[in-house]
Image (cartoon, rainbow, N blue to C red):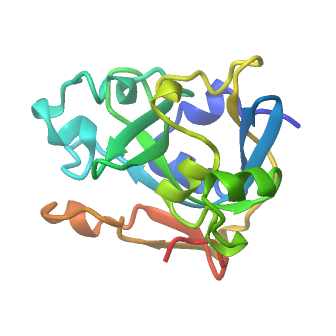
Amino acid sequence: MTRLDYAFYARPACTVAQALLGKRLVRSVNGRRLSGLIVETEAYCDSDERDLACHGDRANQGQPTARSAIMFGPAGHAYVYFTYGMHWMFNVVTGEPGQANAVLIRALQPEEGVEVMTELRNGRPYAQLTNGPAKLAQALAIDKSLNGANLCDPGGVIWLEYALVVAPEVIATGPRIGLGQTPEPWLSMPWRYWIRDNPFVSR
């Protein structure tokens, strides 16, 4: 199963966010593969102007902070952050080094290791294992230890693989979710992408 390489990630976030649909996210836990097909993504900082919905632009006038430094490159690494005091979120770093650019993985269609995912999700039903960014992070045991992980490392414990080809006509777009008081135009940017009618899309 061919892993995605640096060239795949080293493109604008919106391009990568769409291309990631149908790819497989894999996490190795004690030698066991936990995986799912990516069915929903969001792009951040994909503009020459500051994206006030993005960690890399919202704080510190678009300069790296201790939290957001991973977002500024290089591409092909994991950016994992904690939110609401309880949830981990998994992103892949995209674009060129020096500017914050990343894609949030919002939802997966579970494939391998479902019984392990169910245990990690405290017995939640199959349909609710990975249908949201915090849920999929819990189901795949993704936490701070994976922040900065090289997704292209052949010996790594988390990576992405080629899987399905998703036709452009089945990709839906809309505003990103959970942006709070983010001002326009960033609040309404149609930078969320999902596979139309897939039951594992977050909402």
The answer to which of 29 and 95 lies nearer the viewer is: 29
Estimate the x, y position of residue 15 in percent, counting from the top left: 53, 49
Estimate the x, y position of residue 128 in percent, counting from the top left: 61, 71
Q: At 30% from the left edge and 65% from the top edge, which residue is drawn?
A: 178
Task: Tell me: residue 166, above or below residue 68.
Answer: below
Q: Is residue 131 left or right of residue 113?
A: left
Q: Is residue 67 left or right of residue 141?
A: left
The answer to which of 142 and 18 lies nearer the viewer is: 142
User: Is residue 94 in sight in this rendering?
Assistant: no
User: Is residue 200 in sight in this rendering?
Assistant: yes
Task: Tell me: residue 166, above or below residue 11.
Answer: below
Q: At 62% from the left edge and 78% from the top edge, which residue is drawn?
A: 196
Residue 127 sits in quarter: bottom right
User: Which quarter of the figure is the N terminus placed in?
Assistant: top right
Q: At 68% from the left edge and 24% from the top edge, which residue is drawn?
A: 152
Q: At 46% from the left edge and 49% from the top edge, which residue is drawn?
A: 104
